[in-house]
Amino acid sequence: MASLLERIRQPQDLKGLSQGELEKLAAELREVIIRTVSRVGGHLAPALGAVEIAIAVHATLNSPKDKIIWDTGHQAYAHKLLTGRYERFHTLRQYGGISGFLRRDESEHDVWGAGHAGTGLSAAMGFAVANKLRGDDETVLVIVGDGALQEGMAWEALHNIGDSKLSIIVILNDNAMAIAPSVGALEKYLRKLRSSPPYLKLKEMLESALLKLPKGQVLVDVIERWKDSVKHMIIPPGMIFEELGFTYLGPINGHSIPTVMEAIREAKTIGGPVIIHALTKKGRGYEPAERDPCKYHSVPPFDVGTGEPTVSSHKRTYTSIFSDTLIRLAEADKRIVAITAAMPDGTGLRKFSERFPERYFDVGMAEQHAVTFAASLALSGFKPVVAIYSTFLQRAFDQIIHDVCLQRAHVVFAIDRAGLVGEDGQTHHGTFDMAFLRMMPNMVIMMPKDENELQHMLFTAILHDGPIAIRYPKGESVGVELDEQLHPIEIGRGEVIAEGRDATIIAIGDLVYRSLEASNILRQRFGYDVGVVNARFVKPLDMELIRKAAEATGRIVTVEEHCLDGGFGSAVLEALNECQLAHVKILRIGIRDQLVEHGDVKVLRRELSLDAEGIANSIAEWLTLQRAISRPMAALGAE
């Protein structure tokens, strides 16, 4: 007998199901999500916590006519399964498969592409204004996590929506967590609301009691007219959402499908901006994820029975090397402080927070604030280290220029997930940071070839006086032995790894090792002798080393796992121009003008010709063409 989920082709199919069937559907959704993520990896705990909300929303509204916006894309696995993607769900986050986030080109029901949280409320206002201008009556509903409300952009949107009086329904999916437990004043406020008697339940009880009395309806009408006064009597003071112009409904049980459905219907009846405060449990339905939602926020493939990863590695990650080195440096220097934007585990700062709780700051999902906060700490004599993913650093572009670089503040940016990150895909690949940081005056940018160089670079960054960034990739390190004694690296000094006669590869970061492998392939398979240089620094470049390499071979190849537009290769081109070496031939290898799909990193590198084979083949083709061009030119010279 087919499961309920197999019968759901489109969300309209939910309309004919009984409440009992909807509950059964929720169990089936969880089973499929757990089974799939255990095989391919992905965001488990947040997806499990939003199952009933997804069912209630689609059972009540009419997608895609009604606009359903998921602010936090990784909560939307159930939404994907209910909108025609059940048969392809096994391809989740795989190359050529469906995305782990929301994408407009994947389904008409993904009305808003979402990878970074905090954008959904602004998007909802845009859709609502479009409705008004067209004279449409479509419902606009946005599901936003309590962690995402820490984003400054979310509050800008709340302020604007409340003032506009537009009909927008906001479901606040409150599980008391972002990726890690939520922090800050807003979290304390929501905690009070969670522990207060639910307004709707109390209202229902009061109305029911009054209607049993003579002239009870008259009393109910009086209460309705004095609703605001009553509400302030029965809800904790400081109803911030009401003060912003929203009608507040809740808190309600976000795992009760009929309760969420009824709240949506009531919100539609009320009109204007309405917030439905739904309490949920991250990881619901899978005991290990309920017990440790941080660990199971995003997971590699795992054994469902034990909850343990099915693939292990003996190599340490770059993140763990960064973490241990920072603790070692902080033990020797009390001025070092660490800052994260809601990512203590992902950035490796959890251990630092346990060792130095007074010098650790989680500012919540607020990257702009994190950078400016760090700048003022630096100007006060401290040495702040902002540990942040490359893709999230993009959010603080202006703060880096205005508050850090302009004031020459000694802020250390530890940029994790630099380069391709794999299955998270387009919204999470760290392929733009070199381009936007390189243009900023006073900024130093470096990238280690391996974990040993990373620890020395972090030491160098702490000793430096001014803005400085270290970028390093996600995942396993190379596996080299670590030096016991840390030493500074001269700013702007690269190193020659291997000499060559036909060309020189100038590589940055872990691409140095892939370039060395490519050099061996070129020698053995194609007969080309190609040298390799470890640039170490994107800014400032080692101009002397670049000049010598260019003059020695006349051919330079730059290799980077980053966009070519404005990236490392562009920096080398500019350097050669400054050196007036117009005769030097240049090949830039990197990511051309595109957003890279999701998929296994090895697959993506192969497709982009950024693995050793691809690099070698690109260089061999280029060198062969150069030789073909030079022969006729030499013949002309002889004549």
Image (cartoon, helix red, strand yellow):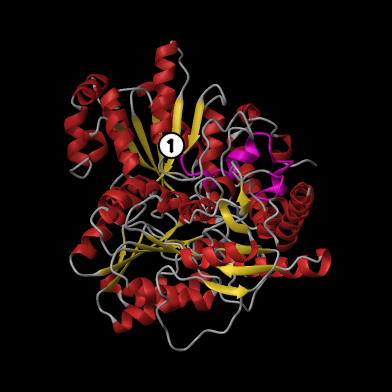
Give the left or right position of residue 511, taking residue 547 as reference.
right
Q: Position of residue 127 (x, y in %)?
A: 44, 24
Q: Is residue 299 above or below residue 252?
A: below
* Residue at the bottom extreme of this rendering: 484
* Residue at the right extreme of this rendering: 525
Q: Is residue 389 above or below residue 536?
A: above
Tell me the element at label 1: helix
* Residue at the front extreme of this rendering: 639
Q: Which of these two is toward me, 293 or 493?
A: 493
- Residue at 49 percent of width and 42 percent of height: 256
Q: Position of residue 196 (x, y in %)?
A: 28, 48
- Residue at 70 percent of width and 49 percent of height: 95
Give the left or right position of residue 287, taking residue 523 as reference.
left
Q: Is residue 235 above or below residue 490?
A: above
* Residue at the top extreme of this rendering: 135
* Mark 1 crowd level (few <14, some 14–19, many ≥20, 10 Å Cα): many
Q: Is residue 236 visible?
A: yes
* Residue 428 inside the magenta-drawn segment: no
Amino acid tagged 1: Gly
* Residue 81 inside the magenta-drawn segment: yes
Q: Which residue is mark 1?
A: 120
Q: Position of residue 174 (x, y in %)?
A: 40, 48
Give the left or right position of residue 559, taking residue 463 as reference.
right
Q: Position of residue 228 (x, y in %)?
A: 20, 30
Q: For the magenta stretch, what is the residue range?
A: 71-97
